[in-house]
């Protein structure tokens, strides 16, 4: 990427996801930061990322972040657990100093993890996520940095994202797969008292997940924690905040065709949206 192409003018906050899932995060972010401008990019043409290798997720994520920088963003949130797990560190440590050391990329694992400390009494936490996120061990590593006493058990749910993406989250068939993974997780560690939904799609399955999780176990969706952490970040970093424009606008970009993106996006957003197709 040629960094001479990057504008120094303030711009919207970029929100990236492999597809639609980041819309569940964006919704919470816009609630706590209603004045800011946002540019959402979904890599719908190449979703899902959850079953792809480290190298591929890193390369795809870097392309999307570079696109958002070119389109004027100074701050990009990776609203995707798989990208946060597999690409964030390398982009922050290797790519940003090369592209523009004044731009920032944030992930969503750390803010989610920070919220956990006071929630679990047994100190046994369950993680439901994509195979990529579970295999990366990012959640246990981040959790244990802050709370070394917490035991984290992961369960990969490879079919949950396709269920949501295909509008099947409310169907009877979805119950079978939701129940299976919840039961697998609780069988691995019966002392779990807190279950983390470590994938942006899973809030759409919350009703079904709650059906199979015993009442004493708390289920944690990450949207509100990510949103309040971003607000806090902007307050603590006025030099970044001043480079974020505020006209309450939100644009949606997809690497797929608009015709494909819009009907499915409505599963994730209550209000109608317009979208534009982009080439990376
Ligand atoms: N958005 C991804 C996440 O939060 C899930 C979708 C995918 O596998 O690409 O992990």
Image (cartoon, rainbow, N blue to C red):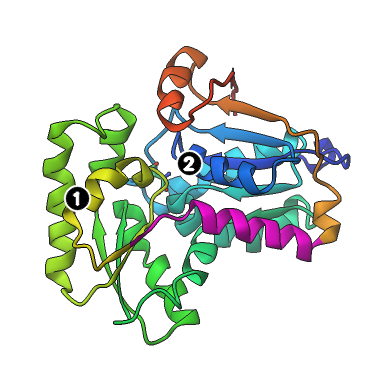
Q: Which quadrant of the rendered structure holds the N terminus?
A: top right
For the C terminus, give its image quadrant. top right
Residue bearing mark 1 = 211
* Disc 2 CB within 8 Å of nearest ligand 1 atom: no
Q: Nearer the viewer, residue 250 or 214?
A: 214
In the depicted structure, whether residue 138 falls above or below residue 151? above
Task: Name the residue tied to disc 2.
Answer: 24
The secondary element bearing badge 1 is classed as helix
Can I make out residue 157 in this image? Answer: no
Residue sitting at x 29%, y 27%: 166
Q: Is the residue 69 above or below the residue 196 in the image?
A: above
Relative to 257, is 130 on the left or the right? left
Q: Which residues are magenta?
A: 219-237
Q: Is residue 76 left or right of residue 113?
A: right
Q: Mark 2: which secondary structure? A: helix
- Residue 244: give its label: none
- The reply to whether residue 35 is visible in this rendering is yes
- Furthest-bottom residue in this view: 149
Q: Is residue 80 above or below residue 278?
A: below
Q: Closest to the observer: 124 or 278?
A: 124
Residue 9 left/right relative to 129: right
Which is closer to the viewer, label 1 or label 2?
Answer: 1
Tell me the crowding category of disc 1: few under 14, some 14 to 19, or many 20 or more residues within 10 angstroms, Cα based: few
Answer left or right for 133 relative to 31.
left
């Amino acid at each position: 990427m040629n960094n001479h192409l990057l504008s120094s003018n303030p711009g919207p906050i970029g929100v990236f996801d492999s597809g639609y899932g980041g819309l569940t995060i964006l919704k919470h972010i816009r609630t706590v930061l209603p004045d800011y401008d946002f540019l959402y990019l979904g890599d719908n043409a190449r979703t899902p990322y959850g079953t792809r290798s480290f190298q591929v997720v890193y390369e795809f994520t870097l392309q999307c972040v570079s696109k958002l920088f070119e389109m004027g963003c100074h701050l990009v949130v990776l609203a995707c657990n798989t990208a946060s797990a597999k690409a964030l560190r390398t982009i922050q440590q290797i790519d940003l100093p090369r592209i523009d050391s004044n731009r920032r990329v944030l992930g969503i694992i750390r803010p989610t993890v920070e919220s956990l400390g006071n929630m679990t009494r047994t100190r046994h936490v369950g993680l439901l996520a994509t195979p990529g996120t579970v295999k990366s061990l990012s959640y246990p590593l981040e959790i244990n940095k802050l709370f070394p006493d917490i035991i984290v058990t992961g369960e990969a749910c490879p079919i949950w994202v396709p269920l949501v993406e295909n509008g099947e989250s409310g169907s009877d068939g979805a119950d079978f797969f939701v129940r299976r993974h919840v039961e697998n997780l609780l069988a691995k560690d019966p002392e779990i008292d807190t279950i983390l939904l470590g994938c942006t799609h899973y809030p759409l399955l919350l009703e079904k997940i709650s059906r199979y999780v015993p009442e004493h176990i708390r289920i944690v969706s990450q949207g509100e924690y990510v949103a309040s952490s971003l607000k806090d970040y902007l307050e603590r970093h006025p030099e970044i905040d001043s480079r974020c424009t505020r006209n309450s606008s939100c644009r949606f970009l997809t690497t797929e065709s608009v015709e494909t993106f819009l009907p499915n996006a409505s599963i994730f957003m209550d209000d109608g949206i317009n979208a534009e197709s982009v080439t990376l």
